[in-house]
Image: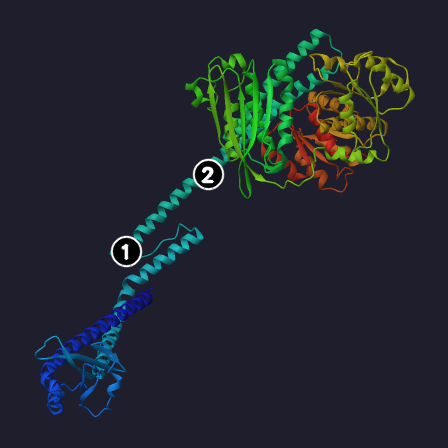
Amino acid sequence: MVLTMLLVSVITLSIAFVVIALYDNSKFKEDKVKDLSILAETISLNLTAPVTFEDVESAKQVLYTLNTNPEIIQAGIFFSNGRFFTEIQLKKDELIPFSSYSKIKKEVLYKDKKLFIQKPIYDEIEKNRKIGKLYLIVDTKGIYQRLRKFFMVLVGILFLSVIISLIMSSLLSRLIAQPVQELSNTMKKVADNKRFETRIEHNRNDEIGVLMYSFNELLIQIQRTNKSLLRAKEQAETSAKIKEEFLANMSHEIRTPMNGIIGMSELLKKTNLNEEQANYLSYITHSADNLLVIINDILDYSKIEAGKIIIEEKEFNLKFLIDNIVETFKPKVREKNIQLILNLDTDLPKYLIGDKVRVSQVLINLIGNAIKFTHKGSVRLRVYAGEKLETTQNIHFEVQDTGIGIPHDKLNLIFDSFSQAKANTTRKYGGTGLGLTISKKLVELQGGKISIDSIEGQGSKFSFNIIFKNASQNNTERNLPKQTQEFLSNSFKSPKRILLAEDNKINQILVRKIFKDTPYQIDVTENGEEALDALDKKHYDLLLLDLHMPVMDGHQTAQSIRASSKKYSSIPIIILTAAALKGEEEKCNSYEVSAYITKPFKATDFLNAVYSVLESRIRTTQGYQPILLIEDNKINRIVTENFLKHAHYTVITAESGKEALHKAKNQKFSLILTDLNLPDMNGLELCKTIRNSDNYLSQKTPIVGLTGDVLESTRHKCINCGMVDFLTKPFRQKELLQIVQKYVSYE
């Protein structure tokens, strides 16, 4: 460091000396030219008469007076027309030819290490008339010699300065630089090793000593602060762990009995009920659904507050997602006799990368609220594309209704936790006041913003945007699950024959078009009587039955088939209807129909339903390896077992981990469903035991976790221990069967 400072000083001094020398030399030249110019001007005045009378001798006598200046080596005169007059050589140097200077117009010129000066000679009578020019040639060796001597003096001064600086630097180094370097090394050591107990030993009382003392005190303070921070960190981690465990336990303890309530209600719905019992059951189901919404809101809010919400990035079909959301609300809008209008921008990308679950959650909340608070008119969902960058796409969503609206003074509070526009809103419409708070947080976590415009009594409009990552738009549509595609592929080996009973020509064309590229063979009849005649003549694997037909409607046809003693009495029936009237589905269930589809339907949903029914039929005739269900809660075990049995799966149950391990060791299963909270070992330990041992016949069997815990960390634990998926309680039969069909391969 000292050497660096010394080097900088030497360079600075050198530059300064060079500048001074050059300036001095320039000044000296300037003064020399000035003196010689005055001398030349004086001589030119004395040459007026000799030049006028062309008296060469007199002119030379005047020129020889320049001998007094030893630097002048040559002088001469020429007329104003350029004709040579005379010249003298004052030194023994080689005479410079007149022609070399006769054409020079400048009064002062440096050339060939010589200084050339010329002055005009004026007429004595006509003062402004030039009659000739005097020129002097001056030797400049003296100027350069002086410059060299000056540089030598400066170099000497510089050398002496360096010697003195070295001596002073050595002294200062011992007094200042070395202690500062020691302090610097100690600071680096502390920074690299985080050893804050390090101290600098010193016995100085000067400013350096104060600096070292202050540094030691700083280390003491940092050491104390670190200990406090470490304790606070440990307390925070403990608190977070306790909060997470409490959230997981609360979720499990609440959702587990909810699974029993919702599951038993769904099983009870499939039994023969009178009208009063069906009404009571609908009240139970409605209350359970409302309670589940409240539970989900509270748990989601808790997860957001605990920072446990993770936004996934997976490719999904945006239009397909929105269509499914709108489809789920159609029964509700029909019930309220309002319209649900969907406006999709034609420029919307088909595929995006983002969290489709959280997008659905926000849209379901906003559309659900709009329908809830709208008694007449319509609810409109508009989706359009915003700014597109190289890697991201901004998508805008608008949910507008003609409902009760929100007072202007309440708009700023609408996204606050547990807040609703009016005090009686919760009592009248239900809800926790958390839905919009959660939606706002979810939108912001996905890089967007949400806003509201509303006029009380006229309606509201919620607008939000989400920034997605771009995805390739050339992917093949894969709306059909893998198992559906696999089933269709295998069906080509043994084509299925399907009978459609439908009187509407357009619907006939539509169904034929859906089955065009499948292995299914379709025959069409226009009423129930024709359908019964067709069943008498041919074998069919499935009957698609419209409810409203002439001659014999769907109800009469289904009753006649089930009451018959003929071979087609057990044929699977899928009901097709455009009027989803209350109680109609329950009535159809009394005929043991396999599925109930409301028109209009999407091709993918229709094919999935057909697949599910036919695949279930094959299970009853050809058989699958059984499913192992591990559940210690008796009610949930009964619910899940019956969900599977009604879909014609063979189920073997176990109430504990040890019992399950014994069965998995001696038998091969097509799928294992296990609760995560078992009494003797949890589901994660059970999965690891099966995966890590070669003694189990079901070592490679897909394992799915069943849990009431909705934390993202639980999902990661399930995947990391070897499970293929997990299903959150409470679940309905449809959700359970989707998981089962996803992992039980068709054989």
Front-lying residue, 264 or 139? 139
**Left or right of residue 614: residue 427:** left
Instruction: Give the residue number, with chain letter if any, for mark 1.
Output: 209
Is residue 681 shown to the viewer in this render?
A: no
**Left or right of residue 421: residue 716:** right
**Left or right of residue 635: residue 667:** right
Sequence-wise, the earlier of marks 1 and 2 is 1
Instruction: Determine the secondary structure under disc 1.
Output: helix
Identify the residue at image location x=60%, y=31%. Answer: 357
Q: Position of residue 93 (x, y in %)?
A: 23, 91
User: Looking at the picture, which amino acid does disc 1 mark?
Assistant: Gly
Instruction: Give the residue number, with chain letter if any, for mark 2.
Output: 233
Q: Position of residue 396 (x, y in %)?
A: 53, 31
Is residue 547 shown to the viewer in this render?
A: yes
Image-quadrant location for residue 121: bottom left
From the viewer's perspective, is residue 404 above or below residue 220? above
Front-lying residue, 664 or 297? 297
Instruction: Point out the residue furthest to the top here.
Output: 276
Front-lying residue, 368 or 116? 116
Instruction: Point out the residue furthest to the right here.
Output: 537
